[in-house]
Amino acid sequence: MSWLKEMAGGEKMPPYVENDSSSPKVKDPYIPNRMVSNKPANRPFLAYRDYREKQEALHAEWLKKKEEHDEKVARGEKVEPLEPDPTAVHEVGVLGLLKFILYLVLIIALAGKFITGSFVWEYESQWLQLRTYMPKSDRLFSERMLAQYDGSDPNKPIYLAIGGVVYDVTKSSAYRPGGSYHVFAGADASRAFATTCLDQDHATHDLRGLSAAELESMQNWKVFYRDHKDYFRVGRVTHKPVDPSTPIPPHCKAKKEEEKKRQQRADAEKAASEQDRGEHDEL
């Protein structure tokens, strides 16, 4: 850091003096008429000088061969194809880049198998499923046809629909009879996905009266089934238009609250009846 001291007005740096007399001197590969020490710190630069001289010699030899080759061709003589310049710098083309990417993927996959026991590092996604890239032909279901795939027939797969799109959910036991989500099977239960109500009257595509938050929740469920690694799309279901005169299915929370109030009224009436009976007995 003595150069900072000099810039600040201090003493000037002393000139560099080569004082290593123990190492042999060789020509400086970059500065003419200068000798440098052959100490270990300088050897990489000296080795590069030797490499460059060898490359120049090889290139000069190739140029001489090329000149002789061109003269023979000009005279009409039959000659062998000229060898490529051994010093030419080869750029990495598209094929080389693809080979590098392939080797990199193989190394990552083998490392995943060694570390986690899985070539894909235990990553699970529909993009790793072969059927994702196979051509698809959507089936068109009616509500009556879709209801046949509710899991009651063990020989048939289990389907559900959300937003009119039908998915195969056979791999999950939750949609089989007795499962926690069996209400979704064999129907377009868009309303149930939006309201999180597992009542049978919510297993419908009727979305009237839902809030913006509930509709957003249904959209999230649509993305869930679309991207799930075990569920896959099989078609669409057609619906009859919703009759606006029919009542909107009550929310399950509202029904629970109503049942709670009804139970409280029943308990109050029962307590009042027992109190009146006790007073009558006293008389």
Image (cartoon, rainbow, N blue to C red):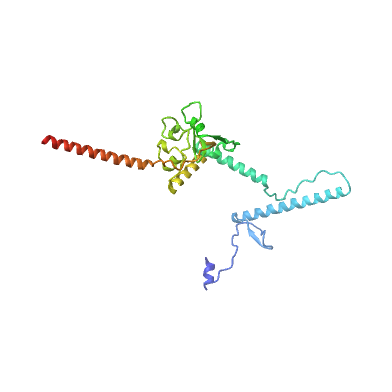
In this picture, residue 35 sits left or right of residue 114: right
Q: Residue furthest front?
A: 245
Q: Residue furthest bottom?
A: 9
Q: Residue furthest left?
A: 283
Split into 4 quadrants, where in the image is the C terminus?
A: top left
Which residue occupies the foreground of this view, 264 or 48?
Answer: 264
Which residue occupies the foreground of this view, 80 or 201?
Answer: 201
Residue 45, given in percent of the width and then of the height, sits at 63, 55
Above or below, 190 against 35 in this view is above
Find residue 137 and report its image quarter: top right
Residue 233, given in percent of the width and then of the height, sits at 54, 37
Residue drawn at the location 71% of the way across and 52% of the way down:
55
Find residue 252 and report its image quarter: top left
Residue 221, given in percent of the width and then of the height, sits at 47, 42
Q: Residue furthest right?
A: 75
Which residue occupies the foreground of this view, 27 or 120?
Answer: 120
Above or below, 94 against 278 in this view is below
Above or below, 204 against 154 in this view is below
Residue drawn at the location 31% of the way across and 39% of the way down:
259
Residue drawn at the location 54% of the way across and 68% of the way down:
3
In this picture, residue 149 sits left or right of residue 58: left
Above or below, 268 against 147 in this view is below
In this picture, residue 85 sits left or right of residue 45: right
Residue 157, given in percent of the width and then of the height, sits at 51, 30
How many numbered discs, if any?
A: 0
Which residue occupies the foreground of this view, 99 or 83?
Answer: 99
Residue drawn at the location 57% of the way across and 41% of the way down:
107
